[in-house]
């Protein structure tokens, strides 16, 4: 089975004018970095793509990157960033520089006049070379200093909690739907400012109440990886950086590492990131996950039903969320992916059991992972959360055919990722977590139609994505991680019927649970225990077993590990180590 690369083309959106602080429609991307130039070196070409695609983008620089070299140097770096973003946006380098009050602090912001969707925030904290600093981001994070960190312009001072709170306030003010940040826990060497800026940002985004996606980028250590950008991307990224460098007096002759960074972009794997498994028409399983470093779509498949496995394949693309896969009525597998530009993409087998297409865009801007379900007549239907936090869907107009336009199932604002399943009578049902952490459901009034019920509140209180499975009799059952980190579930009392009260199945775990159905029809739930082991619980004659410990010590790749251990029965450590070595 040969694989071809997916070519994902960005959707160009129209821009709007007259944007003020906190006012911007659609996707609102924020990037938080330690120094002026970190964004250009380590978050590009993503930032370039989303700006040219019409997104609202705000970059927050925690430090002045001053190097203790005075006002003219760090102001030059700020001016370099302005020139670089004017180049990216393709407009004149003209900015509106203002100061606004936020939680008792004066915040410096620059807005691009000819494209006000682009803005830069400068907190101007001292950078972190300890030998000439009394307080650095690292010292502030570690609690090594009882004093506050003061900006190099003398305007603002923060203790640890105040800095976290101002980052939360900046996210809230912008109504951010996407947070981009550096690596808080690098696998290899990195600058302490990068690490600690990321730690502050990570705590802030975890306490930021609005629904949002998170993308983490690797920094200095990407120079040891293979170049993974196209020639055109590398050339454009280098030109962006050189536009900045003309204003940075320390970069009159950039070292070789800068040219390495401009030909690479690598992501940090989300520890909750999993994958999807599809079954080919001939019975062979095929697994789809995000690439360990390059964030492209990767696949591996059985060479024969229940047989050995192929090498890992690369289907290309740049994806930001767990891929989902479903089988078309004619047996062809089809995968759906949210790109790093928040657009929904898909790729499909050209024939059952065969090669993969080049893929394409399904448009729209989505704020969650997509989910896919199959109607009773075999037509696939895709669901995702929009930037307004309402549920949207597209469906095949005919089996294996083109998809409809996006349509909203409005009436409820929700968070996290949706889940979808088919009832015993053929009606699709979608489950979401609302803003009060309760489970809400909406369902087709009859199979294969676009007539939907009102939202139904099923109660509960949980902090994970909902996970839904079908029992042997066709009744649906939903599993969640409760606010106390234990497993909770609710289920239909009869197929297609009313729902039970919530029941607590105990256990203490992190990340989302995974639910699978055994060959005899019994459901089994697998979770990442707080001790790092794989835990399971399963149905036994109308009730549930106690918790079992399957060992394994799940590490940073927990979502991938769960997929490998639960469904493929392979050692997590062996499979992920082989995977990383093969696909750096």
Image: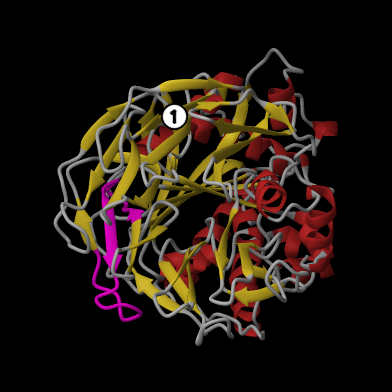
57 horizontally vs 522: left or right:
left
Expressed as whole percent of the image width and height from the top left, the position of residue 2 reads 66, 86
The residue wearing badge 1 is 489
Expressed as whole percent of the image width and height from the top left, the position of residue 392 reads 27, 56
Residue drawn at x 74%, y 26% is 531
Q: Which secondary structure lies at badge 1?
A: strand
513 and 411: which is toward the camera = 513
Q: Where does the C terminus fall, quadrant-wise?
A: bottom right
Q: Is residue 404 magenta?
A: yes
Residue drawn at x 47%, y 77% is 331
Eyeballing the image, is 194 above or below 356? Answer: above
Q: Is residue 199 magenta?
A: no
Expressed as whole percent of the image width and height from the top left, the position of residue 544 reads 55, 26
438 horizontally vs 569: left or right:
left
Looking at this view, name the residue that lies furthest to the top. Answer: 146
Q: Which residues are magenta?
A: 384-406
202 and 262: which is toward the camera = 202
How would you rate the neighbour count of disc 1 (Cα within 10 Å): few for under 14, some for 14-19, many for 20 or more? many
Residue 320 in sight here: yes
130 and 433: which is toward the camera = 433
The number of numbered badges drawn on the structure is: 1
Residue drawn at x 74%, y 25% is 139
Residue 97 in sight here: no
Q: What secondary structure prevails in the magenta region?
A: loop
Q: Quadrant of residue 489?
A: top left
Q: Quadrant of residue 203?
A: top right
């Amino acid at each position: 089975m040969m694989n071809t690369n997916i070519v994902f083309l960005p959707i160009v959106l129209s821009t709007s004018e007259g944007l003020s602080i906190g006012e911007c429609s659609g996707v609102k991307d924020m990037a938080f970095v330690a120094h002026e130039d970190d964004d250009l070196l380590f978050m590009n070409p993503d930032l370039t793509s989303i700006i040219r695609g019409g997104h609202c983008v705000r970059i927050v620089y925690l430090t002045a990157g001053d190097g203790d070299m005075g006002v003219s140097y760090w102001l030059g770096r700020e001016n370099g960033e302005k020139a670089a973003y004017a180049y990216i946006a393709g407009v004149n380098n003209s900015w509106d520089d203002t100061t606004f009050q936020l939680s008792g602090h004066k915040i410096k912001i620059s807005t691009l006049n000819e494209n006000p969707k682009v803005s830069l925030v400068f907190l101007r904290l001292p950078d972190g070379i300890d030998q000439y600093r009394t307080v650095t981001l690292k010292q502030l994070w570690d609690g090594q200093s009882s004093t506050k960190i003061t900006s190099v312009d003398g305007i603002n001072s923060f203790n640890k909690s105040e800095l976290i709170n101002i980052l939360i306030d900046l996210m809230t003010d912008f109504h951010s739907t996407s947070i981009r940040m550096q690596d808080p826990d690098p696998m290899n060497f990195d600058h302490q400012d990068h690490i600690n800026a990321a730690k502050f940002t990570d705590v802030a985004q975890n306490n930021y109440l609005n629904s949002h996606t998170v993308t983490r980028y690797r920094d200095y250590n990407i120079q040891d990886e293979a170049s993974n950008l196209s020639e055109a991307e590398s050339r454009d990224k280098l030109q962006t950086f050189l536009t900045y460098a003309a204003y940075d007096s320390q970069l009159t002759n950039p070292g070789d590492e800068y040219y390495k960074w401009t030909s690479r972009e690598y992501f940090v794997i989300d520890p909750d990131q999993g994958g999807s498994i599809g079954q080919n028409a001939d019975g062979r399983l095929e697994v789809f996950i995000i690439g360990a470093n390059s964030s492209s779509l990767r696949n591996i498949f059985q060479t024969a039903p229940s047989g050995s496995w192929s090498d890992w394949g690369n289907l290309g693309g740049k994806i930001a969320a767990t891929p989902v896969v479903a089988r078309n009525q004619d047996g062809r597998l089809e995968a759906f992916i949210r790109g790093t530009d928040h657009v929904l993409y898909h790729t499909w087998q050209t024939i059952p059991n065969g090669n993969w297409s080049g893929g394409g865009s399904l448009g729209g801007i989505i704020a969650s992972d997509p989910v896919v379900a199959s109607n009773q007549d075999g037509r696939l239907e895709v669901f995702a959360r929009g930037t307004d936090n309402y549920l949207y869907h597209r469906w095949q107009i005919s089996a294996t055919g083109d998809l409809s336009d996006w349509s909203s199932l409005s009436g409820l604002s929700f968070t996290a990722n949706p889940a979808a399943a088919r009832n015993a009578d053929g009606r699709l049902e979608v489950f979401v977590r609302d803003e009060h952490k309760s489970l809400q459901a909406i369902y087709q009034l009859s199979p294969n139609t676009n007539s939907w019920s009102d939202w139904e509140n099923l109660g509960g209180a949980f902090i994970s994505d909902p996970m839904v499975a079908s029992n042997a009799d066709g009744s649906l059952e939903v599993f969640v991680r409760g606010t106390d980190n234990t497993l909770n579930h609710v289920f239909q009392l009869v197929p297609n019927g009313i729902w039970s009260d919530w029941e607590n199945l105990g256990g203490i775990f992190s990340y989302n649970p995974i639910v699978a159905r055994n060959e005899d029809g019994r459901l089994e739930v697998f979770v990442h225990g707080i001790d790092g082991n794989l835990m399971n619980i399963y149905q036994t004659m109308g009730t549930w077993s106690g918790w079992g410990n399957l060992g394994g010590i799940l590490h940073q790749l927990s979502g991938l590990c769960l997929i490998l251990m639960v469904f493929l029965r392979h050692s997590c450590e062996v499979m992920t180590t082989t995977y990383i070595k093969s696909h750096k």
